[in-house]
Amino acid sequence: MRRDTVLRRSQLVTPAAKPTVVVKALASGADSVILDLEDAVPADRKAEARSVLAGTLADAAVRVGEVAVRINGLHTDWWLDDMRALCGLPISSIVIPKVRSPSDVVCIDRVAHQLRQHGLAEVSLQPMIETPDAVLQAKAIAAASPCNVALLFGIGDYIAQTGMRFGSTGTDLARAQVALAAHAAGVDPIDHVWPYAKDLEGLERDARAGAALGYAGKWAVHPAQLETLHAAFMPTPAELDEARRIIAAYQASVAEGIGALLVEGQLVDEAVIKIMQGRLRMEMAERT
């Protein structure tokens, strides 16, 4: 398992069956765009959505770091047709919803491999954790395929099954467990959606809470949320300045044969340096 170089501070989710919305999403500046064939498309429009998606992607300008498609889940009759419809399309990742066990991920991995001879791109995989049972298997799901690059926490179905309240502390345990499982597998943990598109203050609070749990990014439902998400999941200018000062002081100390030291009252050792280097890597990734 390897963590790739794609920033996923924001994953903008948009219905695949709406061409104008898809075109806007692909030019939005989001880190990642997820074109949705699942919940955003009614059952009687699945085939139409696949056709619309193919036509839209053929001409759309792409100004985002990743183009992903959320297929329908393996418990439906639509997922295999979704996979076939992705052959020849300029996508880089597949989001797998409602994953029930590691075997679901293995199945999609194998089908994706077989479809490469029919024009499917070498796609990465992003399983979604949406049920209590999946939360308890999150580590195994995150590690189920070497193509996995992210583990997504889908809160809607989780709340529907548990009766918990959105925005309450009831979901905190599962939220933390999904993030921990992703880090253990070396993939990006992506936090659940904030559905209130105009409530940017609430979004910022929730995004920073996710960042504190170790999430790398969060789902967005509207381009207006992107700037808030990018700020929440990046080190602040003060944190970047601190990282440069601490690394410089540590390097000077090592050159003199000294290991751990105090910098501005903080004990600095190798573990702290890794944290500071991580901040600077994020800054570099944003610039590229």
Image (spheres, grey):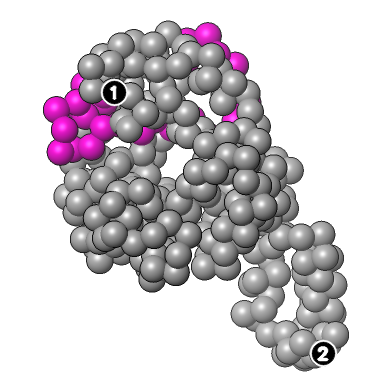
The residue tagged 1 is: 42
The percent coordinates of residue 46 (x first, y second) are 27, 19
Camera-side residue: 127 or 274?
Answer: 127
The percent coordinates of residue 111 (x first, y second) are 20, 33
Query: Residue 204: which quarter of the image?
Result: bottom right
Quick check: is 60 in the magenta stretch?
yes
* Rendered position, 258 above or below 236: below
The percent coordinates of residue 253 (x first, y second) are 82, 85
Q: Which mark is residue 154?
A: none
Helix, strand or loop at mark 1 = loop
Camera-side residue: 273 or 214?
Answer: 214
* Rendered position, 154 above or below 249: above
Left/right of residue 101 with respect to residue 254 in the rendered view = left
Quick check: is 34 in the magenta stretch?
no
Q: Is residue 150 visible?
A: yes
Q: Residue at x 42, y 8 (%)?
A: 55
Q: Residue at x 73, y 89 (%)?
A: 267
Which range of residues does the magenta coloring cover?
57-83
Amino acid beneath label 1: Pro
Amino acid beneath label 2: Gly
Q: Residue at x 21, y 61 (%)?
A: 133
Mark 2 or mark 1: whose residue is earlier in sequence: 1
Camera-side residue: 248 or 285?
Answer: 285
The residue tagged 2 is: 265
Helix, strand or loop at mark 2 = loop
Q: Residue at x 85, y 85 (%)?
A: 264
